[in-house]
Image (cartoon, helix red, strand yellow):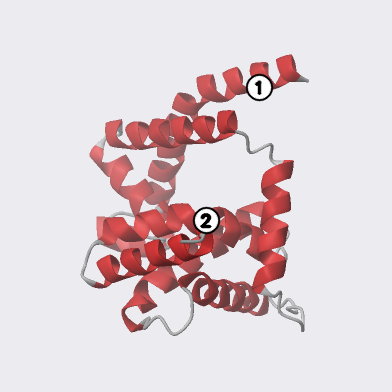
Amino acid sequence: MAEDDVSQALDQDLVARVQRGDSAAFDLLVRKYQHRTAALISRYIHDWSEVQDVAQDTFIRAYKAIGGFRGDAQFSTWLHRIAVNTAKNHLVAGNRRPPTDDIEIEDAEQFESGLRLRDNDTPERELMRQQLEQTVLRAVEELPQELREAITFREVEGMSYEEIAERMDCPIGTVRSRIFRAREAIDERMKPLLENDNVRNRAHA
């Protein structure tokens, strides 16, 4: 079986699991497509923090709509369309004009390949990414409950500050403070890893 066929079969299996209520299977789809999705969105939007917000919104929309996904197109194509529409809607909402021509999925994949090459995506980098991911998860688990809930509502569920304030029954200022403190704690845990990575990069330079 060709690599593309294996990838599509895996996607179909994961989608079916999500449709049966397995939300962890969707996390795997997010991990598989997050770089490609961000690379695609960055062709429309140039501010990286906005790109991350729109990518998160893309996956939230995909999760809500996945029950209606019937496999008529590949999952990657379906997700690509959602990402393009989400990026264009974001630009329109900010009174910015979206490009008239959509980026084709092949162009996006080529762009992503170039992005990953430029990002020096070696086995070392992949290991580093996994270590960072595990460090973040551990840091979140160790947070006090109110900080853990606030950062999870914001970063995982994509809720607005207003929605989080309502869910947690506290002022928006408190929500902002909790998210800020949570991010500070996570950054503190990541700092040694990032510093070691910088040392390695200078050594290889």
Residue sitting at x 72%, y 14%? 203
Residue sitting at x 42%, y 44%? 179
**Relative to 40, is 102 above or below?**
below
**In 3D space, how far apart are the residues under numbered discs 2 and 1 (Cα atoms)?**
24 Å
Q: Secondary structure at mark 1?
A: helix
Task: Give the residue furthest to the left.
Answer: 20
**Relative to 122, is 79 above or below?**
below
Residue 34 is marked as: 2
Task: Sort mark 2 into few (<14), some (14-19) or many (20+) by Cα contacts within 10 Å.
Answer: some
Residue 10 visible within the image: yes
Viewer-nearest residue: 165 or 29? 29
Task: Give the residue furthest to the front.
Answer: 1
For residue 168, side relative to residue 184 (left or right): left
Residue type, numbered disc 1: Asn
Residue 198 is marked as: 1
For residue 102, side relative to residue 89 (left or right): right
Image coordinates for residue 154, horizontal then vertical, percent: 40, 54
Q: Quadrant of residue 106?
A: bottom right
Image coordinates for residue 162, horizontal then vertical, percent: 39, 63
Residue sitting at x 56%, y 78%? 81
Image coordinates for residue 66, horizontal then vertical, percent: 36, 76
Image coordinates for residue 105, horizontal then vertical, percent: 65, 72
